[in-house]
């Protein structure tokens, strides 16, 4: 994968994204994927809902979430470490849009994460 989550990559995976598919994926693999993967996807989801985030960044977000949802990955999810590629795509998208991620967006993601996981630590909330 490129060092930067590109517009063309986002276009490739954006058709796979929907809110329903995202939350279905999270409910099916949340524990297996881990807190950081889920928190990253939630931060991106809430950034997508934020009206102040530019369209260019939203396209990046949709592409990264589409990749996370996609059943065919560079590393199949059923293998040990199978979510490493998903986390890579999510982190690249987060780094691309980070300047437009608000404290409110992070707080919403954290609140939702704590509804699903017990014992969320500050370390879990450090994305990079």
Image (cartoon, helix red, strand yellow):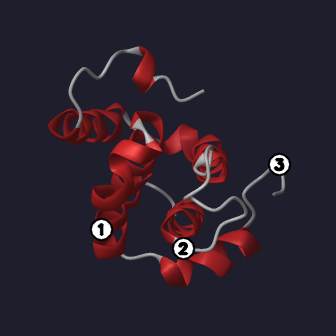
Query: Who is closer to the viewer here, 122 or 75?
Result: 75
The residue under label 3 is 3
Q: Is residue 19 above or below residue 50?
A: below
Residue 82 location, x and y as percent? 61, 51
Mark 3, secondary structure of its residue: loop
User: In the shown orientation, is residue 37 left or right of residue 13?
Assistant: left
The 10 Å Cα crowd at callout 1, few under 14, some 14 to 19, many 20 or more, is few
| Inter-mark Cα distance, 2 to 1 | 12 Å
Q: Earlier in the sequence, mark 3 or mark 1?
A: 3
Secondary structure under badge 1?
A: helix
- Asked whether 79 or 62 is in front, the reply is 79
Identify whether 33 is placed above or below 58: above
Work out whether residue 87 or residue 71 is closer to the camera in this orientation and state it: 71
Q: Quadrant of the C terminus?
A: top right
Is 14 on the left or on the right of 34, as rendered? right
Sequence-wise, which precedes: disc 2 or disc 1? 1
Q: Residue at x 50, y 80 (%)?
A: 16
Q: Residue at x 65, y 71 (%)?
A: 10
* Residue ID for mark 2: 71
Residue 63, given in percent of the width and then of the height, sits at 58, 68
| Residue that mark 1 sits on | 24
- Residue 84 appears left or right of 106: right
Determine the CA span between mark 3 and mark 1: 28 Å
Q: Quadrant of the N terminus?
A: bottom right
Q: Name the secondary structure under disc 2.
A: loop
């Amino acid at each position: 994968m490129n060092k930067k989550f590109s517009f063309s990559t986002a276009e490739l995976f954006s058709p796979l994204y929907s809110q329903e598919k995202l939350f279905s994926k999270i409910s099916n693999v949340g524990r297996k994927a881990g807190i950081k993967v889920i928190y990253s996807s939630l931060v991106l989801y809430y950034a997508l809902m934020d009206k102040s985030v530019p369209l260019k960044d939203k396209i990046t977000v949709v592409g990264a979430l589409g990749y996370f949802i996609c059943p065919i990955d560079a590393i199949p999810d059923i293998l040990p470490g199978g979510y490493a590629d998903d986390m890579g795509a999510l982190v690249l998208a987060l780094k691309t849009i980070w300047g437009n991620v608000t404290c409110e967006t992070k707080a919403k993601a954290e609140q939702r994460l704590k509804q699903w996981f017990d014992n969320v630590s500050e370390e879990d909330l450090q994305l990079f």
